Image (cartoon, rainbow, N blue to C red):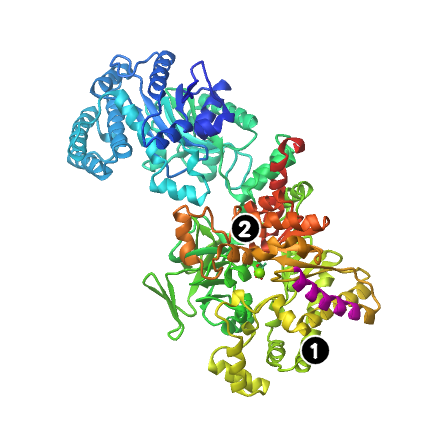
Amino acid sequence: MAERFVYGFGGGRTDGDAAMRDLLGGKGANLAEMAKLGLPVPPGFTITTAACNAYYASGRVWPEGLEAEVAQAIADLEAKTGKRFGDPANPLLVSVRSGARASMPGMMDTVLNLGLNDDTAAGLAVKAGDERFAYDSYRRFIQMYSHVVLELDHSAFEAILETYKDENDCRSDTDVDAAGWKHIIAAYKKEVEKASGRPFPADPKEQLWGAVAAVFRSWMNPRANVYRKLHNIPEAWGTAVNVQAMVFGNMGETSATGVAFTRDPSTGAKRFYGEFLINAQGEDVVAGIRTPRPITKAAREEMGDKQLSMEEAMPEVFAQLTDVYRRLEAHYRDMQDIEFTVEQGVLYMLQTRNGKRTAKASLKIAVDMVDEGLITPQEAVLRVDPSSLDQLLHPTISPSFKRDVIVQGLPASPGAAIGKVVFDPDEAADLAQRGEAVILVRTETSPEDIHGMHAARAIVTSRGGMTSHAAVVARGMGRPCVCGATDLRIDEAQGQFIANGRVIRRGDIITVDGSGQKGWGQVLAGAAEMVRHELTGDFARVMEWADSIRKLGVRTNAETPDDVRVALEFGAEGIGLCRTEHMFFNAGRIAAVREMILAETAAERVRALSKILPFQREDFVEIFRLLGDRPGTIRLLDPPLHEFLPHSPEECATVAASLNVDPKALQARVKELMEVNPMLGFRGCRLAIAYPEIYAMQARAIFEAAAQVAKETGVTPNPEIMIPFVIGRKELAAVRAIVEEAAREALAAAGVEIPYLIGTMIELPRAALRAAEIAEEASFFSFGTNDLTQTTLGVSRDDAAKFLGLYVDRGLLDRDPFVSIDADGVGELVQIAAERGRSARPDLKLGICGEHGGDPDSIALCMRLGLDYVSCSPFRVPIARLAAAHAALSEKPQSRA
Ligand code: PEP
Ligand code: MG
């Protein structure tokens, strides 16, 4: 049988329902559902998303059968309404609206009053007993249709109207009478013919097909394309078209139109909340021509508004609306966003959908609805979008604040902060010590800048992508960060930066919004108004439910005691990645680290390392104390050694003097360690193969610390030693031996037993492929998906921002692969490694510690691939807990309800 493309609703017979959202779009499915519930819905029909897809698949040709189905649907609609398309005595008028599966601003605007022409307008005037109303409706139709369907410039139409009003002393549209509208209509039609070369279509059927084509076209318009990309809405979903009999909110003082939420969308409070306009059509509310009034008396009084609310002006209709909204909320079991029209005292429902809300409101509504017995805790968990928690975990800019944007970049680390511009990390640290709020602005950052980054309230860079050093470190520290702001040029010599023609000086106050607006991080002039949120109450209850549902563990990437503390407060169950190199940059230690690197013999190296040992041990003591018996994955030294050395000749001279070495020798060693491709160079466990003393020292520090804390607290720490950048079994076996020997010695000396694991990172494609043999030497794998993405795609994590955006825009990549795991490539390597690893060692523990560990889509993938835990920066821990619960619920939604 041929595919069915049209589904009718309302007026007695309804074919669809809310479950058919994919086919009928959100609006169409909900109109059908409301009609089925017996609510007053003007009858109409929906042309399916499948028709839209077929239209595109065949090169913009109507799919076979559609025309006949639409003709039948119009005949049905005529029968239901008792009106006829094009009948001057009793004309059927319809609205045409788009409606995709997800609500999508940016799609086609609505066309109202379709079906009007010179004859039907005259008929409507007689039937409504109101000539002015009929011709006002007609001119609105021509204006909307010309703009939306014929795509003519609407300024010409506005000019015609304004000229008429000026010449006839009309202050507003309401002063224009029927004769005036007729005059304007004639001018509009002339304008259409002039601009399009064709007369305005008078045949209602031709009007309708024009509007249907315009809805389909709007699916691919640039606004819709941008929105789809930002929200990951597949092009293949298509849009539906809703054609519905018109009802008029502009038929005098007993008519009205309005929108409302069944609960407050910004706070979540349980109160009906909305706005309406008497004697108006829907677009008057949206266009802001007149200021809408509150629906309820309480809201009117709160606002000090003198004009009557709907509750007071139309008490009977209000009572009916109250009944309807309560039924809708109880039926959908979620907060609804509704649209309605009152035509001469009769209420009609035009739309209902789950209302958009702030993160705060979403938590409150979810918790309240559980308490009201409306939904289960599982459903409550699913109602809160994990990513939206970002809004709560960091202070954010007040939504009503008017932004003065200096420059945009990538929203690399969420939250917003205000401070003075500084360019130098030392200065940032100094000023912060004196209690100043500073924002560090750099071309890019490196490990040497850590102290300045930590001191800064926020970080801005002009280069680098979502996993650049600045982005990773800022997220880890919970500092807002905008990176890759390519329009920003720093002139440190002049003490200023220039962006989009504006000069911002050192010391000027700026606000950094790392959460992003429409996908961009922003740098704003001056101090923005901020809001802060509470993390107890509703938040805590939803998180508790999430924890009872999820199966994936959630750990944190953290190396400072501060970060560990924050992460534990946010519910981390251990450390998944402690990057020990960050501990080497501390001002008190870097000299000894450099001495170690410059050492020419193993003995010299051991001497230098013995100076670092007590510091490292102290770091681990603090961390083990905080962790108790929770697992702590400690990764041994990973980055290339030259990162710790000075670079410019001046820096070399200073460092040489302080270390008491020959500056020439230092420069020579720097040169020797320099690499063209340091990310693929002499780093990770390769360092330990060349200099086993380094890992031996680190392992000794870890086990001495663990022994000390065990004795001191009576709680045995649970260290997991992680070897980075491994490519094969033999390599891991050699490094493992170094660690085991150091552990044996340290524990024997302390006389304490500390069970521990040795495992590896899987961050190179070869390691993923050789996972079976590697697992023979590893008790756990942790997927380092930052490096694995970089090496699988051959894309540098520091430079990719330049072209990755282009790839995403062109649809060559779905998402930035450093933000959300490239499921087809990197994901398959993870799968291969997990399977092969577990085939060799069934109890192999699997986790992920790349930045993807805090991304909800990647977390869902980790769950599907059977990982045991994810690890992410402290501020993303709650997001990961919730996302892991979502992943668990989407695996088996029924059995858990
Ligand atoms: C990784 O590569 O994913 C990882 C966690 O290590 P790093 O970011 O420190 O290279
Ligand atoms: Mg790595």
Q: Of the residues shown, which amino acid type is indicated by label 1?
A: Ser
Q: Is mark 2 within 8 Å of ligand 1?
A: no
Bounds of the magenta span?
729-746
Q: Is residue 389 left or right of residue 71?
A: right
The answer to whether 481 is drawn above or below residue 51 in the figure is below
Question: In the depicted view, which residue is nearer to us: 288 or 729?
Answer: 729
Chief SS of the magenta region: helix
Q: Nearest to the eye among marks 1 and 2: give it.
A: 2
Secondary structure of the residue carrying numbered label 1: helix
Is residue 7 visible from the viewing direction of this image?
yes
Task: Specify the quarter for ligand 2.
Answer: bottom right
The answer to whether 167 is drawn above or below residue 732 in the figure is above
Q: Are marks 1 and 2 in contact (CB under 8 Å)?
A: no
Picture coordinates of residue 417, whole percent (x, y): 49, 59
Secondary structure of the residue carrying numbered label 2: helix
Question: In the depicted view, which residue is nearer to us: 465 or 778?
Answer: 778
Picture coordinates of residue 99, whole percent (x, y): 41, 31
Picture coordinates of residue 148, whole percent (x, y): 29, 33
The answer to whether 429 is drawn above or below residue 360 in the figure is below
Residue that numbered label 1 is attached to:
610
Q: Of the residues shown, which amino acid type is indicated by label 2?
A: Val
Say few, some or many: other residues with alpha carbon within 10 Å of mark 2 (under 14 / 14 to 19 / 20 or more): many
Which residue appears at 27% of the width and 27% of the height? Answer: 141
- In the image, is residue 819 part of the stretch drawn in magenta? no
Say few, some or many: other residues with alpha carbon within 10 Å of mark 1 (under 14 / 14 to 19 / 20 or more): some
- Mark 1 / mark 2, whichever is N-terminal: 1
Report which quarter residue 476 is drawn in: bottom right
Badge count: 2
Residue that numbered label 2 is attached to:
826
